Image (spheres, grey):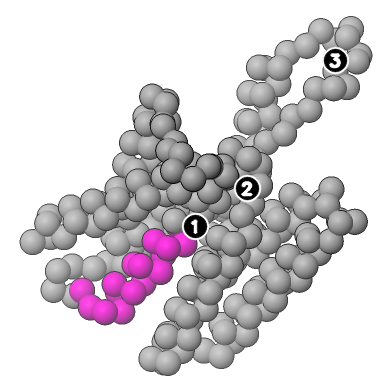
């Protein structure tokens, strides 16, 4: 029965991963009515990889809850769904950021609302204190303030940086501080590697000053943050399963 249970959880992850990839390719591009997007061979390969990774992540999250067929109940299923929704939003944000270098605020708001409903549910069944609700509302208020600032024209050139700050606040809503610190560390490492790799790709003649000035290294920081956060969550899940 346990094998059947975890096989089902893995398949759920694959289905959700498939959904994420389809959404990523639909959201940034405004298509004409009845126009269908045809995936390239590379995109199809990426779709399979992301779906499999989502399947593994799904199993990892379920394992961290230490659930068996006999101990499975409504609360554990809600916790599983809660974390999977969070991971889905991270995958969507990462995919879109890689494609158009933009953080979709709508996704953050949907995830934040789901998280708030989850916190109210835990408070109702006496699994959470008032302080946690206050902390969550504080993060949500900061996100709302940053959204207002981003939409002002005079701050347009800082919009991506402000969106990254929103993303960090959003992550803090869902994960404990230790996981977020690991996320920041992994993000810094991946960004350094990304800069080195991109510099190697964009090698220019040192004597060509004009070319050097016009060469910009732009990395999708949001994507690195999201991927690092998922890895940090899985690391936490592994630690929990060892206890």
Q: Residues within 10 Å of mark 2 (few under 14, many from 20)?
A: many
Lower sequence index among marks 3 and 1: 1
Q: Mark 1 points at which residue?
A: 89
| Nearer to me, 175 or 88 | 88
Where are the magenta residues, as a range?
72-87
Asked if residue 155 shows in the view, the reply is yes
Q: How crowded is mark 1: few (under 14 residues within 10 Å), some or many (20 or more)?
A: many
Q: Which mark is residue 222?
A: 2
What x and y, as percent, mark residue 187? 61, 45
Lower sequence index among marks 3 and 2: 3
Q: How crowded is mark 3: few (under 14 residues within 10 Å), some or many (20 or more)?
A: few
Q: Which residue lies at the image location 84% right of the left edge and 61% below the top edge?
A: 152
Answer with left or right where residue 36 lies relative to residue 200: left
Could you tell me how many numbered marks the image carries? 3
C-alpha gap between disc 3 and disc 2:
27 Å
Asked if residue 232 shows in the view, the reply is no
Q: Is the magenta stretch mostly helix, strand or loop?
A: helix
Vertical placement of residue 158 versus 69, above or below: above
Q: Name the residue under label 3.
A: 211
Quadrant containing the N terminus in the rendered view = bottom left
Residues at circles 2 and 1 in contact by the CB criterion of under 8 Å: no
Quadrant containing the C terminus in the rendered view = bottom left
Q: What element carries label 2?
A: helix
What x and y, as percent, mark residue 115? 50, 73
């Amino acid at each position: 029965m346990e094998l059947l249970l975890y096989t089902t959880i893995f398949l759920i992850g694959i289905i959700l991963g498939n959904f994420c990839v389809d959404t990523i390719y639909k959201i940034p591009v405004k298509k004409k009515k009845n126009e269908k997007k045809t995936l390239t061979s590379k995109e199809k390969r990426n779709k399979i990889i992301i779906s499999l990774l989502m399947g593994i992540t799904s199993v990892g999250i379920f394992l961290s809850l230490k659930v068996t067929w006999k101990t499975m109940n409504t609360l554990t299923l809600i916790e599983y769904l809660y974390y999977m929704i969070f991971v889905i939003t991270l995958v969507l944000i990462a995919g879109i950021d890689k494609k158009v270098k933009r953080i979709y605020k709508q996704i953050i708001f949907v995830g934040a609302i789901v998280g708030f409903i989850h916190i109210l549910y835990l408070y109702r069944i006496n699994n959470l204190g008032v302080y946690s609700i206050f902390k969550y509302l504080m993060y949500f208020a900061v996100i709302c303030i940053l959204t207002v600032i981003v939409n002002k024209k005079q701050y347009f050139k800082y919009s991506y940086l402000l969106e990254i700050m929103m993303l960090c606040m959003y992550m803090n809503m869902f994960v404990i501080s230790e996981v977020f610190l690991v996320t920041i560390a992994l993000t810094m490492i991946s960004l350094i590697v990304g800069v080195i790799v991109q510099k190697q790709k964009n090698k220019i003649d040192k004597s060509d000053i004009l070319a050097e000035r016009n060469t910009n290294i732009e990395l999708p920081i949001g994507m690195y943050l999201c991927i690092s956060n998922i890895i940090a969550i899985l690391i936490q899940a592994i630690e929990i399963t060892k206890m």
